[in-house]
Image (cartoon, coloured by chain):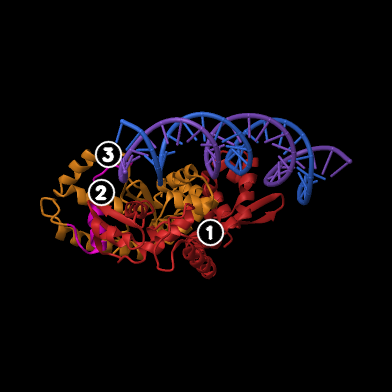
Chain colours: A orange, B red, C blue, D purple
Amino acid sequence: MQLDRLVRFHKTIGDVTRIRILALLKNGPLHGQALADKLSVSAPTITHHMAKLREVDLIYERRDKNTIYFYLDEKSLIQQSEAIVKKVQSAAELVTSADQEKVRQDELKAESILRNFFTKEGTLKHLPAQHKKKLLVLHHLVEGLQPGKKYLESELNDYIRQFHPDFATIRREFIMNHFMYREQDIYELNPRELWGTSKL
Amino acid sequence: MQLDRLVRFHKTIGDVTRIRILALLKNGPLHGQALADKLSVSAPTITHHMAKLREVDLIYERRDKNTIYFYLDEKSLIQQSEAIVKKVQSAAELVTSADQEKVRQDELKAESILRNFFTKEGTLKHLPAQHKKKLLVLHHLVEGLQPGKKYLESELNDYIRQFHPDFATIRREFIMNHFMYREQDIYELNPRELWGTSKL
DNA sequence: CATCTAATTAGATAATTATTTAAATGGATT
DNA sequence: AATCCATTTAAATAATTATCTAATTAGATG
């Protein structure tokens, strides 16, 4: 994971109030006022904390009239909390030959699956229903995007349309599986460590 | 793990320099000067960071003459980085079990309040002005509605009128406090976790 | 159009903290 | 004893940030 993002994640978790928020959300969604009441802090304080949590994808939200319900993204919490270990380990990690062998086999499997879901011309027939295969296909699609580049929604749509007419579904899948994130109407790739794993 | 310690752990990790230190130590022990050189910071800065890392047991040290060698405690890193996930889980459970302790007492209080605002015949005298008591009364009223069932406005009015002639106010309170949801002219119960809390 | 409500923004304050330079400590070596 | 060297402490500064109150925005309701 990008160092900066890793730092921001831990800075975000390193606050009592925010840990309490995560614990409360673990029992189900809550709106801002409810959180403010339960934690005995003001509404703006909640806004502040939710912005931090959102920034590192620990929550997502659903609007109902004037009320916004916050949900815990537990998968994201698990993924990111493990990332620090990987980061430190990767400093000296030697890839064993056994690993390399497995990597090659997985590549072959992946290629075969991709051949199945893409035409010879390179367009996508349809999204796989099976979760891991779907991730593999999304991973493949997203490879054509530039890390760090900011995309307008229309640009992203155009890119996806090269492969399949239903850009809306695929764009949504990108977000849901943490390949990309959206800020206002700007889309950007996430660091690869946050991508839904396509390990076979 | 203690909440305070968990916070300190993440605060400690939430710093670029300290993550770099951990990554360097993963390749083997280093002394303070070496770290200062590699990271281009002053010796006191290293002292400062090592104190933080020591405080949460991420390093241990061995002295040789005047030189102190720092070692990474990787097991501790792994264990503590996973702790947040468990904490969120167990804190969430705590919240619910703490509630359970209070539940019986609250039930008794609630019954007493309801007796106050309802007649022996079961009709509502008037809506309480106090917010939490009002929620309690609304909660009680809404218990007679079927989850998942779609109500026409007129049906809902009829239901409420069993308790009180001013169905419009009460219907509006149902919506405002998230007991129900309206789409066009169809009313439906919200899931209970969205209801206005009637905790006393 | 006026009002309500939940959420956000703006602005201010107080606390925390990463960093530096300068001075002090505490063993080892001569 | 005098000195050397790695580390620590002290003091100062600058940046970050958690929190509050007051004002504003944005939707929904009447």
Q: Which mark is residue A142?
A: 2
- Tell me where residue A119 appears, x and y as whole percent: 11, 54
Spatial CA distance of label 2 from label 1 is 33 Å
Left or right: A140 with respect to B34? left
Q: Chain of mark 1?
A: B
Q: Residues within 10 Å of mark 2 (few under 14, many from 20)?
A: some
- Tell me where residue A175 appears, x and y as whole percent: 29, 50
Front residue of A69/A2: it is A69
Q: Chain of mark 3?
A: A
Left or right: B157 with respect to A29? left
Q: What residue do we see at 26% from left, 44% from top?
A: A145
Spatial CA distance of label 2 from label 3 is 13 Å
Front residue of A193/A186: it is A186
- Tell me where residue C10 appears, x and y as whole percent: 46, 30
Q: Residues within 10 Å of mark 3 (few under 14, many from 20)?
A: some
Q: Which residue is mark 1?
A: B77
Q: Chain of mark 2?
A: A
Spatial CA distance of label 1 from label 3 is 37 Å
Question: Does residue A144 belong to the magenta stretch?
Answer: yes
Q: Which residue is mark 3?
A: A151
Q: What residue do we see at 61% from left, 46% from top?
A: B49
Q: Earlier in the sequence, mark 2 or mark 3?
A: 2
For badge 3, the amino acid type reads Tyr
